[in-house]
Image (cartoon, grey):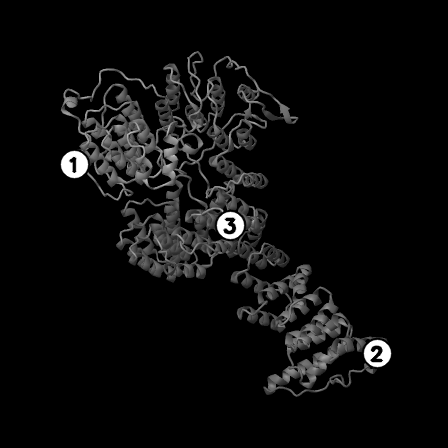
Amino acid sequence: MLCNFCSAELGHKDFQFPITKTPHSSRKSQNPQFNSTSRVSISTHTTRVFRGFLIQSKCRTTEFFNSVNYPCLYFESESGFDKKLGSCNAIRNPRSGARVSLGFRVGFRLQAVVSPTRSSGNGRKRKYGGALPSILRALERSDDVDGVLGSFVGELNPKEQTVILKEQRDWARVLRIFRWMKSREEYDPNVIHYNVVLRALGRAQKWDELRLCWIEMAKDRVFPTNNTYGMLVDVYAKSGLVKEALLWIKQMKQRGVFPDEVTMNTVVRVLKDVGEFDKAERFFKDWCKGRVELDDLDFESVADPKSGLGPLSVKHFLSTELFKAGGRMPPLKLMGSSLEVEPSIRKPRMTATYNTLIDLYGKAGRLKDASNAFAEMLKAGVAPDTITFNTMIFTCGTNGLLSEAESLLQKMEERRVLPDTKTYNIFLSLYADAGNMDAALMCYKKIREVGLFPDDVTHRAVIHVLCEKHMISEVEAIIEEMDNLSICVDENSIPTIIRMYVDTGLLDKAKNFFEKCQPRSRISSKTYAAILDAYAEKGVWADAEEIFFGNRSKLTNKDVIEYNVMLKAYGQAKLYDKALSLFKSMRSNGTWPDECTYNSLIQMLSGGDVVDTAKDLLSEMQEAGFKPRCSTFSAVIASHIRLGRVFDAVDIYKEMKRVGVEPNEVVYGSLINGFAEAERLEEALHYFHTMEDVGIPANQIILTSLIKAYGKVGCLEEAQRLYGKMKGMDGGPDVVASNSMIDLYADLGIVSEAELIFNKLRENGQADGFSFANMMYLYKSMGMLDKAIDVAQEMQESGLLRDCTSFNRVLASYARNGQLVECGELLHQMVTRKLLPDDGTFKVLFTIMKKVDIPSEALAQLESSYHAEKPFAREAVITCVFSAVGLHAFALESCEVVKAKAGLDNFVYNVAIYAYRLSGKVDEALNMFMKMQNEGLKPDLVTYINLVHCYGKARIVAGIKRIYGQIMCGDIEPHETLFKAVIDAYKECKRGDLASLVEQEMRFTFDERENSGSETEGEELLGYGTEEELDPEIYENPLEASEASESDQLVFSD
């Protein structure tokens, strides 16, 4: 949550125009209230940045800073920070020659005589003499008004009575003292006292008491003056009752009182603050001509939600006792005193009036008029004050005229108008927006150097700009400085600082800072929500949860906005169960969900396809009296479409229409696309025509869905017609529409048309993974394998392999063309990118394994394990593929993981043994077999096949004989694949004689099975079948027999 600063903070109270304005634009202010002003990007000229403000190529900024008479100024030069420029008492002459800045120039007349002025913000509290100090102190200490003032009966003159009333801070105390004064016989009611009391009641928004006071004023025959009306306009407007405030001017006109300059200025300011710039200017110009025209102001249907009064017509308002009884002029004053038009031409003489006008034109984006008003002010001899210059500086700077703003600072000193803290706050903000952080920080330092003190706005502004740039050390230095001065970090800055820490991953610092702020600041719900949002945006839900459920005052309930942000945090992390649990706990904790709660939660659940719960909440929301937004209905419909439940989506559409929410193009697009995917062309066209009937034009997405629908049913001509229509739209067909056409041509086997679209996409750089995948599918289906491979290679080189679908298409092309090594390399890319292979991927992988020399029993075992979703089944398949295509290094990486695991199934060990065997690491394969036995797992057929191949590769004839003997004894079920493995193993050991004997036995065994249909009994073949006969004497080479026996003891020791 960004921290914004209103113009009242940066400049002065009348200085609140939105910074997003462009020069010469006339737009209404979006919101004149605090924190509503947005920021702007400032385009600046080329500069060299020193430690202070911007210094241009002829030291222009140095010039205007040197002209300011400060004791000592230090700027950072190119050679270091310590170049002392010193003070400059002489005022430098302005540069000669004309300069044009975007058609705007501040007009100065240096010869105009203007009296020296100090900033209005530097006024000191007035000191009173006589008995007033003791009376005021006594009233502060005691509630006994009679006791304190009773001893001064008859001694206080009206002026002293006024001072006593004005110095009270509480409206009730003001009223009590006023009542006491009126109770004295010698008291003579006067309008000044009534003005003080009315102002106190208006500021406290005590409208009933104000009405009674107004009636009482009339009874005392005290007539309102310009000050009275101006004050009433001011207090009503500041309470948000703008239209009621302006009605006082109408009542003033009816009473024959012409507004003076103060009242006029108040009215202009009120209209300016609500964005009625044209009406404000018209009122000012009418006043200058001596008339007051209020006919164009909207007084009808005066209503304000804050007033609690409901709609009031002008007739009703004017007929109340407030206007009927209050402030009637005596007949003599009313006779011939119609002051609607005064003959003389009036000119404003107050600085405040020109300040309001300059701010008015600045907010309206009329820079030339602002400049003219400033020039007219100087021409009229009206002394500009600090507020004037602050307003002009802000107006120039926020409209891209930073150099003009800088020159104004020099003019301030020329006229002996000293900058105040707000002046530097403005420059700080302007330089930060321009990206000149050095100058922004120098503004902050300059405040103390010139004897001023940073205020809350200063700290908030500098913290904001530093946090935005993630300048952590500088922010911490500012916070430390504030701590040393016992200044708390402003509440609005807390979320900004925490967001900076969270964005940079410094979660511990964010937590420590929050804990430090908790006891020192009373954090509002709005601020808590902003803090939670900082965590939610980064998906750090656990930290957000800790703050949300942390220790807080039990006297206050969490506001609904906090719940909404916490729900957002859960949604970002896809923790839908937690989000629902939190939602259900809201009412029991005293907080009721609002419209935003329901809309956010329904959209969140729909996005996660938890659509049944979302549908229930949609009904609950309507029962609670809330009307779902169109985007909420759209999210539920889209979720149903994704799940293939198109008719459920239609039910939501009908409900949407029933409650009066009009579907938009997104809703219609979802329905059309859903029916297109379901190959229901008639329904898709129905919603397309319905959309056209309600005046919603078809966009590219909807036309693409229709092309898809036509493609599903093979309507080539209609698809081509829509595609041709898209060519006439702005930007032409998008890549999705083009891919849909390529897909349609691929299904129909139309190569040339598909190639035209594909080549066009490649020329424009629009071809994506789907484009390449569709072309590969087309070429494969047409038997053009060479072209399919070329497209696959181009796709891989283009970096378009980003998801499983694109990988699967390329894998299938390589597999069909027999490029199995390339398949393995692509598979490794998927694993490296942490793309989880899907069912389509494994379908291709099993196809690859059927093309290589993998025993069918091993393949069947892997397939059954995968479909049963056994642990490590996916990893085992991938490892087996790596080994089968010869990428042994990749396979062994997976085997190392298996070594560290326990409790694995046989198929995992079988794959590991297979991988080690093919890579030539027979010892590792046999060790894996021993680990399998240690785990208590019995070897299966696949295990024995792998072991026989390992013995053959290691020339361990005894191992082969042992397994063959177990087959002959019936311990291992005879199987043709195992017999072939034994034969191959003997051949690898150069024992062709034994291989021939086993081959004969295999034929005899399986021929007899075919003839008798029964299993053969275990027989011995030449004495080699039993374990007892596997001894060293049978070997021709005694050394070989000895080595084999030792190996057998190592491998098969029980």
Residue 282's spot in the image, x, y percent?
A: 28, 24
Please report whichever mark, 3 or 1, sits nearer to the chain's N-terminal start.
1
**Would you identify the image quadrant in which residue 1032 lies?**
bottom right
Report the front residue among 549 and 104: 549
Relative vertical location of residue 337 with respect to residue 422 in this rendering, above or below: above
Choose mark 2 or mark 3, whichever is in front.
3
Please report whichever mark, 2 or 3, sits nearer to the chain's N-terminal start.
3
**Would you identify the image quadrant in which residue 833 lies?**
bottom right
Choose mark 2 or mark 1, whichever is in front.
1
Report the front residue among 47 and 414: 414
Going 68% across and 82% down the picture, which residue do you hit?
967
Residue 209's spot in the image, x, y percent?
A: 25, 40
Residue 1051 is left or right of residue 682, and the answer is: right
Q: Within 10 angstroms of label 1, few (less than 14), some, or many (20 or more) residues? A: few
Residue 750's spot in the image, x, y percent?
A: 46, 51
Secondary element at tag 2 = loop
- Dot 1 corresponds to which residue? 319
On residue 90, which mark appears?
none
On residue 1036, which mark appears?
2
| C-alpha distance separating marks 3 and 1 | 58 Å
Secondary element at tag 3 = loop
Q: Amino acid at mark 2?
A: Glu
Q: Within 10 angstroms of label 2, few (less than 14), some, or many (20 or more) residues? A: few
On residue 538, which mark appears?
3
Going 34% across and 39% down the picture, which residue do you hit?
170
Choose mark 3 or mark 1, whichever is in front.
1
